Image (cartoon, rainbow, N blue to C red):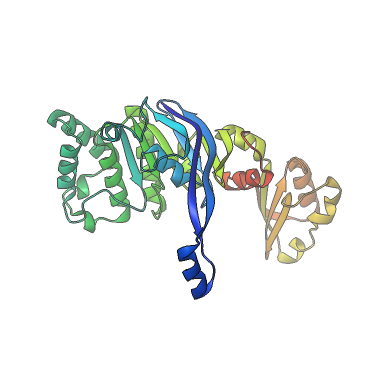
Amino acid sequence: MIQVENLEKYFKKTIKQPGFLGSVKSLFHSQKEIVKAVDDISFHVDKGEILGFIGPNGAGKSTVIKMLTGILTPTGGSCVINGQNPQKNRKKYVKEIGVVFGQRTQLWWDLPLTETYTVLKEIYEIDDAQFKKQMAFLNEVLELDPFITSPVRTLSLGQRMRADIAASLLHNPKVLFLDEPTIGLDVVVKDNIRKAIAKINQEEGTTVILTTHDLEDISSLCKRIVMIDHGKKVYDGSLYNLKQKYGQMRELNFEAVDSESAATLDYANTFAANALEEGDLTVTTEGAMVSVGFNTDKISVEKMLNYTLSKIHVKDINVKDADIEEIIRRLYKSGVEDA
């Protein structure tokens, strides 16, 4: 469905010297610097797959998405979506994709939502029967009815996001690009958006590329992720394998009977012989509440529990697996490629 091969995007950046004289000098003798926003990235996405496309700010995610949607032209390499080049035959290509940018809207601000969809129907040349069928489906999945007659400017952020997703799906695209679809939303609305995306994917077979900083989006929707950093791909594989390889961290949380006994615990010296590296053992204490993060490759859960329970009495205790954010942080630290 989507083939990205050796994709590159370079930008020329003008280097300006400081001060007024520097500004004047740059007018006549400007210095240019080549910035590699995307550097030799390749990946494939199968039909009907939801791919998590993640990375820190400035990693190059949005630049890749803009090339895949045809907004930017690659400096090198190629991207082909459903047999088409995004930069060629633009009119035909955009009818096969849907795009949602979380901080931008494609809706008309002062029009009621129903009229916005009618305008989009004409733009995409959707026939009456298909439009009616698709609107019925989107109403069911995204629950648009309560606000579908309201002007877009009166919608809450969560309502507008649902309306934007519906707008991107009116023409039943084969590929949906979602850039931060849950940004700024509360927990309940985020959950509803995720459920809607999953249902659309299952029932319509829509291929989805999801760019997000919300790692719960990834955990809920994606079995596979591509991670980039500084324009380069650093991981392409399943979320399960990522957790298996970099999910050795566990978190022990407990409440001691009193703060004095909690203060007697000395994890650092107890496990000093375990060849611990930075980040392998962290301890946070707030009164009688203690949280211990530890690398199970260096300290087993059994040994951690045995030491803790042999030293103090506790009111409550639990061991929690590492979350996806911690896993990704460890992957970045390791600097691996294509695990």
**Residue 148 in the figure: left or right of residue 188:** left
Q: Nearer the viewer, residue 172 or 336?
A: 336
Q: Residue furthest bottom?
A: 20
Is residue 59 in view? no
Residue 55 appears at what percent x and percent y?
A: 53, 46
Q: Nearer the viewer, residue 338 or 202?
A: 338
Look at the image and tell me in which quarter the C terminus lies: top right
> Residue at point 80% right, 51% down?
310
Q: Nearer the viewer, residue 16 or 192?
A: 16
Look at the image and tell me in which quarter the N terminus lies: top left
Asked which quadrant contains residue 207, the reply is top left
**Residue 189 in the figure: left or right of residue 295:** left
As drawn, 82 above or below 115:
above
Is residue 148 in view? yes
Count every numbered label the image shows and give the total: 0
> Residue at point 54% right, 54% down?
33
**Residue 79 in the figure: left or right of residue 149:** right
> Residue at point 21% right, 48% down?
146
Residue 264 appears at what percent x and percent y?
A: 80, 62
> Residue at point 55% right, 42% down?
228
Q: Nearer the viewer, residue 38 or 226?
A: 38
Residue 94 appears at what percent x and percent y?
A: 29, 35
Q: Residue furthest front?
A: 28
Q: Residue furthest right?
A: 273
Asked which quadrant contains residue 143, the reply is top left
Residue 97 appears at what percent x and percent y?
A: 32, 34
As drawn, 182 above or below 240:
below
**Residue 132 in the figure: left or right of residue 219:** left
Q: Residue furthest left?
A: 128
